[in-house]
Amino acid sequence: MSVASAAPTSSVAVSWSPKWITDRIGGVVLHIAVISLTLAWMVPTIGLLITSFRLPADIANTGWWTALAPPYKFTLDNYSQMFSASNLGQGFFNSFMISIPAVIIPVTIAAFAAYAFAWMKFPGRDWIFLALVGLLAVPLQLTFIPVTTEFVKLGFTPDKLTAIGLPPFIPLWLAHAGYGLPFSIYLLSNFFRALPSDLFESAEIDGAGMLTVFFRIVVPLSVPAIASLVIFQFLWVWNDLLVALIYVGGTPNVAPVTVSLVNLVGSYGQNYQLLTAAAFFSMIVPLVVFLSLQRYFVRGILAGSVKG
Amino acid sequence: MHQLWFKRSLILSLVAGLTAVACGTSSTPSAGSVKVMATWTGAEQASFMAVMKPFTDSTGITIQYEASRDQDALLTTRVAAGNPPDLAAAPSPTLLTNFAKTSKVVALNSVLDMSALQSQYSQGWITLGEPLNDGKLYELYSWVSLKGLIWYDPKNFQAKGYNIPNSWDSLINLQNTIKSGGTTPWCIALESGAASGWPGSDWVKEIVLSQAGPTVYDAWWQGKQKWTSPEIKTAWQTWGTILGSGDSNVYGGAKNMAATNFGDGGTPMFQSPPKCYMHNQASFITSFFQSANAALQPVTDFNFFPLPDITAQYAGAHVVSGDAWSMFHDTPQARQMLKYLQTADAQAIWVKRGGKISPNNKVSLDTYPDPLSKSTAQILVATKIAKYDAGDLMPGDMKNAYWAAVLQFAADQSKLNSILANLDSIQAKAYTS
Amino acid sequence: MDFSVLLTDLPTLVGVIIGVPAVLAAYIVGGEYLVRRLPDKARPSVRPWIWVAPALVLVTGFLVLPAIGTISQSFEDNHGNFVGLTNFGNQLGGFPTGGAWIAIRDNLFWLVFYTLFVLFFGLILAVLFDRVPYEKIVKSLIFMPMAISSVATVVIWKFMYAYQPPGQAQTGTLNAILSTVFHQDPRTWVQDTTPILGLFPLNNLAIIAAAVWGIVGFSMVILSAALKGIPGDLLEAARVDGAGEITIFRRVIFPLMMPTVVVVGTTLVIFALKAFDVVYAMTNGNYDTDVLANRMYKLLYQHFPSDYANASAVAVILLVTVIPVLIFNLRQFRAVEARR
């Protein structure tokens, strides 16, 4: 049930009364506002989409909107050049190998920690939590050298890991987890804390243990929050370039698809129009993830959860 | 209940772990591999792979190639962490020289055949690779390029009866003639994202070399010649005469210079009517010309003449740049690869594909695929005073300040004194570390 | 494009997808198991640590230890000698245009405009979209820019801001609108330092706009999730009582969303202070658009050898500016706790 269905409809007011007219206009204004805002927001993206079907000469000399009028000079060149780029298939696979654990690990660990911060008392809890929020501000570039130096000392490099049969991406999973945890914990604690305490009390009375409460009550009720977090962490990892280059490198066997796509452009920036096609190609997977998680963004999971 | 969970999850994780281990591929024995890092992406990466193909075919050594335009950040981090690649190629030697100073790279005197090198390379390219002046070679140049090429459209020149200037004075005359004909003579484009300003810095350094000579030029990039000194100041002012007062000699003026990407800089030359007549840029710009205008053909539609000499004493002076290689791990495979890269055969492969010039004098001029690259190679071979790109030899923050100064000067030429004073203060700190 | 590689390595991928959650679940289940073996009294003091331990370990290794290293480095020079506040002097000297002051000023612009615009748009869009039946579609469209990598975002906005001299056909979207609809001269959006309203340089706002466009999806999604957490009964009750929509928003919806607004706002403020990608790719800080993170990057990677000392000082300045935000959060936190 969304707010819209709880909004007054014309069945209450008499037809053509001032209230009915205001409601109707309000409805129309709403739709106009929503649609025009969305269209304006999409202009840059539409520009990019159209540009990805144009030849470099046209892109350099005319604006993208001119392509919408005859003569129509569209081309699939950019896309075909992108697809014939070296290493795209392996890059795609590597991106999945990197992204999936790099999302599961921080989200799970953050859920555990957020649950503790929200519902357990322990000494120093507030200060540790505050420190975590503060850690959001640490610039990543300053952590690269200290951490990779330690990894190399411990022999925790992609080459050595492959040699003993483990996936070479483990350092990268841990890095993405470490960098993503402050925000994840911050977000999830906020949602966990918002759950009514009556829930926990009734559960305790019913004799449920911590694990049951966590897996059977807290997690299901926080699905919108967890879904949002999964989307963001996935996006951040999927589109990441620098962290991957630093922790596993850019060699074809481990490089994610972002590396292959950014390397379509020559070192002087030649063929930058290929990036327009690449941008849309790499958008597909995050959008699919977003759309498939959309169904978890529903209201009303809480309704009726606490019996009187 | 929980015990069941516990047992289940334990079993699951054991199974998963074992599967992962079992599926881990064991490396098949081979002739070894070399880890290489460079900035060649896109079409250049394809060319580099073509260069390496005969090598990998004949030796069986695999190349693990990493390309990134963020090479500075990446290589610095890797070296600091202790796992650099075996070989790295950089478009500017600044980073590699720094590694030589901190003993992170290997001296190549025992790696390469030095006598072959001496006979195939002009001494200038070898000395450039010995930045510590201790006779040890740390950088090997494989491909080079020439700067200070003034591009023009021969059809435009013919239409107006303009002649190619062969001296600085005739260049200025030509510039003034074009201007009085109602068009801006020059196209200059400075935008380049994080590196904005570098095309202008090319202008200034070419002027410094041709006007003040190689000794001043060397002292300048070494930080011993002040920016406020008369020679350097005059060079900037000379560039100011090219720009014209208020940048009136440049198409679109200051605003357009700052906002136009260097790759699009020369395109207005080919419009009809042309918006400008000349464009100073290195040889890679031809691929940008043809990308913006597929119908353009070399020689008929675009050609170049070298920037005329300013001072007769320093005639034939040119600014050059190149790709330098350094070795971080002395492995047999890396040695073989570097030796291969030094040979004329290897270098000729890329030369034939277009876009690079070889410093190896055994690469014959006929290898060059088109008349334009051939003439560039000829100039390079014949040049009497070849000096490496000064900006690339300066410390990183000096170079960045230089580029920023170009932007400031182009925006307001009257601020030259304060711009140079600021560069001096940076110079005072940049050369000590 | 060779996708055959997917087939050969698929078992590894599947193994990883199953193995990773299994390991984590085993950890927490095993941990609880151990806790249950303890006497009742000991449990509450041991249990929380088991739940937060993995997070603390990772965060300490990747963030805390390097941060401490950075802080101590900011008081040393590049050879490890203690130099007190010299690095800070370098960065903070020469007020108002020397050292890091331009970057600090620009970060303040980011702080104000980026945060406000993203919060504002995120909230408005979340509220408006909630009331239309095609919510999922428009939400996905607004979300799309988030799925675009920062490299592509810069490409898009470079097209938007492209400049041709006056009188020429414009290739940039904004300049085309300016010249055809408003009959104004085109502007060099990214290089122009003309102050808007006498205060804020145009190019800073232009770069901020590109970043805002990319991240509104983030605030919209989170605020929308919070909005949907408000029980429909509450709103029904308010309406039955005769309250108008705007009143309901002010008195019911917004206060209930406040904690989430604080979370999103805090995160955005920190992102604004850490802004880097878009600035680096568009101008590298030229034309008075420098920001602290970009300055730090230049000190680290465009100096040879890296100037860790000064880069650390800049990082510490950044961390210090975050402290007021943390204090605000602490207050909110305490207020929520008190209400429970």
Image: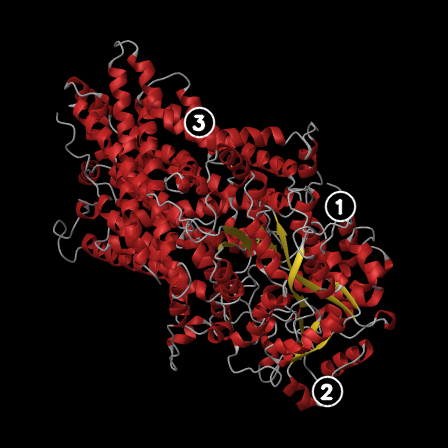
Q: Is residue A308 visible?
A: yes
Q: Which mark is residue B162?
A: 2
| Distance Cα–Cα, label 2 vs label 1 | 45 Å
Q: With B308 as the anchor, is C324 left or right in this view?
A: left
Residue holding disc 1: B431
Q: Secondary structure at mark 3?
A: helix
| Distance Cα–Cα, label 3 vs label 2 | 72 Å
Of the pair A41 and A174, the residue shown nearer to us: A174
Where residue C72 sits, quadrant-wise, is: top right
Give the mark toward the camera: 2 or 1. 1
Of the pair C90 and A55, the residue shown nearer to us: A55
Residue holding disc 3: A130
Of the pair C153 and C21, the residue shown nearer to us: C21
Q: How is the image coloured?
A: secondary structure
Quarter of the image that includes the C terminus of chain C: top left
Q: Residue, x 29% and y 22% (percent of image)?
A: C31
Percent position of residue C11, x then y: 27, 46
| Distance Cα–Cα, label 1 vs label 3 | 42 Å
Percent position of residue A66, x then y: 42, 75
Give the mark toward the camera: 1 or 3. 1
Please give the chain letter of the residue carrying mark 3: A
